[in-house]
């Protein structure tokens, strides 16, 4: 591969994903891989390919940007292993990758000193990292608020990127807040099951029958649902709040 071609791949993660890894991208995946936005929320249904996009971004960064650090944060060790496995599988399929200096079930360090580290969602585990270039939060709706607030400062000096991916888990927590009122700094991408060509209509009909409407709409149509045990809807509670209250005269 010539220098010009290699430079083009370094500047375009989507082209790299298709030409080098052989991955067939959906349109929304191409958009995410080519985005320059530092803050991205992926509100995508199950099996839509959101974890694969995160793995592609982390691996592309590690290969083309020496000494970069990517952290893959998940709520549990099992989920961390699953996300990192996607990275490992993609790396293993490359013909001429940057050689690995060290590799385990949860981390890889390349000879160019780039690292990809996968971590379970525990505050004590993540606090020691700094200078993070890419922070991926998987199953973001299940990551506690205090952990989210703990990891954000890792990007303060490095100016790194934050990409959070999840299906909704009710109208609560930082993930819901960032999606609904987090401001214009986020690129928000929503992908429902109807937009995923790999999920058939027959399968969705079966899932709707077995899961029930609450889980079905949440897992496959990315809707933020009220808690099943809630006495009042989220909208009713917010609508009852009066922000301007006149002071009582003494």
Image: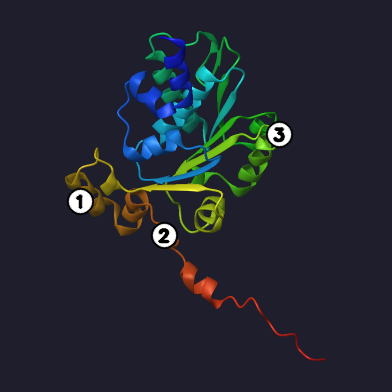
For mark 3, does the 10 Å Cα neighbourhood hold few (<14), some (14 to 19), or many (20 or more) residues?
A: few
Mark earlier in primary sequence (1, 2): 1
- Specify the label residue 184 is tagged with: none
Where residue 205 is drawn, which disc sits there? 1
Q: How far apart are marks 2 and 3 (CA)?
A: 36 Å
Q: Quick one: SS at disc 1?
A: helix
Q: Nearer the viewer, residue 14 or 124?
A: 14
Q: In this view, does 49 lie to the left or right of 210?
A: right
- Between 192 and 67, the one lying in front of the other is 67
Q: Where is residue 173 in the image (x, y as percent from the top left)?
A: 55, 54
Looking at the image, residue 22 lies above or below residue 208: above
Give the x, y percent position of residue 29.
38, 36
Lower sequence index among marks 3 and 1: 3
Left or right of residue 115, residue 31 in this image = left
Q: Which comes before the other along the chain, label 2 or label 3?
A: 3
Q: Under tag 2, what secondary structure?
A: loop
Query: How far apart, in angstroms, are the residues tagged by discs 1 and 2?
Result: 20 Å
Residue positioned most to the right:
250
| Residue occupied by mark 3 | 157
Rendered view: 141 above or below 59: below
Question: Label 1: how many residues lie within 10 Å, few (<14), some (14-19) or many (20+)?
Answer: few
């Amino acid at each position: 591969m010539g220098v010009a071609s290699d430079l083009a791949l370094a500047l375009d993660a989507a082209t790299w994903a298709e030409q080098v890894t052989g991955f067939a991208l959906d349109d929304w995946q191409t958009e995410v891989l080519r985005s320059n936005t530092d803050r991205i929320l992926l509100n995508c249904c199950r099996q839509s390919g959101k974890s694969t996009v995160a793995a592609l971004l982390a691996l592309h960064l590690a290969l083309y940007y020496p000494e970069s650090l990517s952290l893959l944060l998940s709520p549990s060790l099992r989920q961390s292993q699953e996300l990192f496995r996607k990275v490992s599988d993609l790396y293993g399929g490359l013909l001429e990758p940057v050689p690995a200096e060290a590799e385990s079930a949860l981390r890889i360090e390349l000879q160019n000193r780039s690292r990809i580290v996968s971590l379970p969602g525990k505050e004590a585990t993540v606090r020691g990292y700094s200078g993070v270039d890419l922070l991926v939060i998987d199953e973001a709706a299940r990551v506690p608020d205090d952990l989210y607030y703990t990891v954000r400062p890792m990007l303060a000096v490095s100016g790194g990127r934050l990409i959070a991916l999840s299906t909704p888990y009710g109208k609560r927590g930082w993930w819901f807040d960032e999606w609904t009122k987090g401001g214009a700094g986020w690129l928000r991408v929503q992908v429902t099951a109807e937009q995923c060509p790999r999920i058939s209509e027959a399968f969705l009909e079966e899932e709707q029958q077995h899961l029930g409407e609450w889980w079905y709409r949440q897992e496959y149509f990315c809707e933020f649902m009220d808690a099943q045990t809630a006495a009042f809807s989220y909208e009713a509670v917010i609508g009852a709040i009066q922000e301007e209250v006149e002071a009582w005269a003494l």
